[in-house]
Image (cartoon, rainbow, N blue to C red):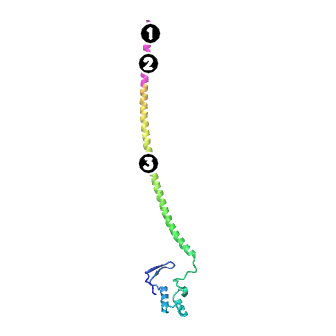
């Protein structure tokens, strides 16, 4: 029984891509069976001829490919290791890029925060200096007013003492 037409390329995990133009061993085996009358008990001569034409064993009993008797897990491990290393390299590159980007963003954020803090510090320092100058002026004005009031009170006290002395003299006279 002929098979349906295959796509141009099929995936074969052990040999990569398979071209349709290459002879299909499975179809050749089926054609040989059809030419021999389709009997499963073909003559030993036909079986030998079929074995020479096809790399498949005649006694596979319906299997398309022989099972690999010498499966080497290190081959898969090696392929997997290469794939994981490639993936790890990509992840490492991405993480390094993100780390550098994060450092840049952090540094720019710190610079802008420090700049704002310095501006606020300068503004507050200027405001404190201005308040201190105003306070000093007010204290100086109050101090001068207090000194002038003290001088006036001393002058009035002296006048009062003079008046009191004069009054006490007049009392003595009378």
Check if residue 60 falls in the magenta segment: no
Q: Nearer the viewer, residue 170 or 13?
A: 13
Check disc 3: other Cα within 10 Å, few if <14, some if 14-19, many if 20+. few
Query: What's the distance in space between the residues labelled 2 and 1, CA to CA?
Result: 18 Å
Query: What's the distance in space between the residues labelled 1 and 3, CA to CA?
Result: 78 Å
Comes first in the chain, label 2 or label 1: 2
Secondary structure state at the residue bearing disc 2:
helix
Relative image position of residue 121 (x, y in whole percent): 45, 44
Check disc 2: other Cα within 10 Å, few if <14, some if 14-19, many if 20+. few
Check if residue 151 falls in the magenta segment: yes
Q: Which residue is mark 3?
A: 116
Res. 143 image quadrant? top left
Q: Main secondary structure of the magenta part?
A: helix
165 in relation to 58, above or below: above
85 in relation to 38, above or below: above
Res. 152 image quadrant? top left
Q: Nearer the viewer, residue 12 or 163?
A: 12
Check disc 1: other Cα within 10 Å, few if <14, some if 14-19, many if 20+. few
* The C terminus sits in image quarter: top left
Instruction: Indicate which disc residue 157 carries.
Output: 2
Q: Residue at x 50, y 65 (%)?
A: 91
Q: Which residue is mark 1?
A: 169
Secondary structure state at the residue bearing disc 1:
helix
Q: Residue lying at the far top in this picture: please name it.
A: 174
Query: What's the distance in space between the residues labelled 2 and 3, CA to CA?
Result: 60 Å
Secondary structure state at the residue bearing disc 3:
helix
Magenta span: 148-174
Circles 2 and 1, Cβ within 8 Å, touching? The answer is: no
């Amino acid at each position: 029984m002929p098979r349906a037409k295959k796509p141009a390329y099929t995936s074969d995990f052990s040999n990569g891509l398979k071209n349709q133009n290459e002879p299909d061993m499975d179809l050749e085996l089926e054609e040989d069976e059809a030419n021999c009358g389709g009997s499963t008990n073909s003559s030993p001569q036909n079986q030998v001829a079929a074995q020479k034409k096809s790399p498949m064993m005649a006694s596979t009993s319906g299997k398309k490919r022989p099972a690999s008797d010498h499966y080497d897990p290190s081959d898969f491990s090696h392929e997997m290791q290469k794939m994981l290393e490639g993936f790890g390299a990509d992840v490492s590159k991405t993480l390094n890029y993100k780390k550098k980007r994060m450092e840049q963003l952090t540094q720019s954020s710190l610079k802008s925060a420090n700049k704002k803090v310095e501006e606020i510090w300068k503004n507050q320092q200027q405001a404190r200096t201005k308040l201190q100058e105003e306070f000093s002026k007010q204290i100086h004005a109050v101090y001068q007013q207090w000194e002038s009031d003290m001088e006036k009170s001393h002058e009035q006290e002296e006048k009062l003492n003079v008046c009191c002395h004069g009054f006490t003299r007049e009392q003595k006279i009378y």
